[in-house]
Image (cartoon, grey):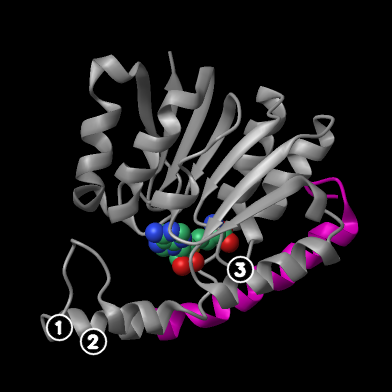
Amino acid sequence: MGVLGDARLEALVGRLHEQSAAQEAETHRYFTERAQRGELSWDGLDEQSHRFMADKLVALDPIKAEFCHLTCRALGAKRVVEVGTSFGVSTLYLAAAVRANGGGVVIGTEHEPAKAAAARATFEAAGLGELIDLREGDLRETLKVIEGPVDFVLMDIWTEMARPAIELIAPHLRVGAVILADNTTQVRHAYGRFFEFVEDPKNRLRTMTLPFEGGLEFCVKG
Ligand SMILES: C[S@@+](CC[C@H](N)C(=O)[O-])C[C@H]1O[C@@H](n2cnc3c(N)ncnc32)[C@H](O)[C@@H]1O
C-alpha cells in the first residue's frame, strides 16, 4: 500500500501519471525546438505554447505529490490552495490528505476549460469532488477571495504566475503554513519575482530548497 492508503485511488493516480509521462517526450521536443529557433521568452508562454500545452497533464512527479500528501497530513491541513490544477493529479493527493485530516477544502485553479472539465470528472470518479473547490479562470481573479486561514499551498504553475499567486495567498497563511513550489532549482531565474517576495523579511517566510529532481522549495510562514 502506498502513502495514500487507498488502493483504488493509488490505481487511478498511477494511470494518470502514466498518461502524463507519455506526453513528456513530445513536450520536451516542442520546447527544445522552439528554444533553438530563439522563439521562447522567460517572461511567459506565448499563444502558440499555450495552445500546445492545453491538453498536456504536466502532472507533479509522483514522489513530490506523495511528499505534498504527507506534509498536509503532518500539518493537519484543512484549507489547501493548489496553484495550477491541470487534470487534477496532484489535487487528488491533496484532497485525500484533507479527507484523512477530517475534512476541509482544496481550492484548485485552472484556466483551461477542457482541463478543468476533465479534472472535475476525475474528482467525482475518485469520490473526492465534495472536498475540491476548483476555480476555473485566471488565478489572478479566482484567488482574490480566500475564505479562511490557509495551511498548505502547492505552487505548480507557469513560473510567471508564481508571484501574483503568492501575493494573493500570503495574507491568508496561518503561522506554520507550508508552501511547496516545484522546480525552483531547474528554473530558478524564472522564479525571480517569487523569491523577491519570499526573501522580503516583512512577508515572514523562511525557505530552503529540498533536493528533489529540479528542486522543490519548502517555505514556512513564521
Ligand atoms: C504544471 S500544471 C499543474 C499540474 C498539476 N498540479 C498536477 O500535478 O496535475 C500548471 C497548470 O496551470 C495552469 N495555468 C497556467 N496559468 C494559469 C493562470 N493564470 N490561472 C489558472 N491556471 C493557470 C495551466 O493551464 C496548467 O494546466
Q: Mark 1 falls on what kind of element?
A: helix
The segment highlighted magenta reads 1-27
Let me know if residue 24 is in the magenta part.
yes
On screen, residue 122 above or below 127: below
On screen, residue 213 above or below 124: above
Which residue is at a point 42% across and 78% down the rendered structure image? Answer: 53
Query: What's under tag 2, amino acid-wise?
Result: Glu
Which residue is at a point 47% across and 34% down the rendered structure image? Answer: 179
Earlier in the chain: of badge 3 and badge 2, it is: 2
Badge 1: few (under 14), some or many (20 or more) residues near its Cα, within 10 Å?
few
Residue 83 in picture, x, y percent from top left: 49, 49
Q: Main secondary structure of the magenta part?
A: helix
Earlier in the chain: of badge 1 and badge 3, it is: 1
- Can you tell which quarter of the image residue 70 is in? top right
The answer to whether residue 3 is seen in the rendering is no
- Residue for badge 2: 33
Q: CA distance from mark 3 to mark 2?
A: 28 Å
Q: Which mark is residue 66?
A: none
Q: Quick one: 39 or 146, which is closer to the camera?
A: 146
On screen, residue 195 above or below 14: above
Residue 88 in picture, x, y percent from top left: 64, 61
Which residue is at a point 65% across and 61% down the rendered structure image? Answer: 89
Let me know if residue 163 is in the magenta part.
no
**Mark 3 CB in 8 Å range of ligand 1?**
no
Q: Which mark is residue 36?
A: 1
On screen, residue 59 above or below 187: below
Residues marked 1 and 2 touching at CB (< 8 Å): yes
Residue 37 in picture, x, y percent from top left: 12, 86
Q: Quick one: 125 or 186, which is closer to the camera?
A: 125
- Residue for badge 3: 116
Badge 3: few (under 14), some or many (20 or more) residues near its Cα, within 10 Å?
many
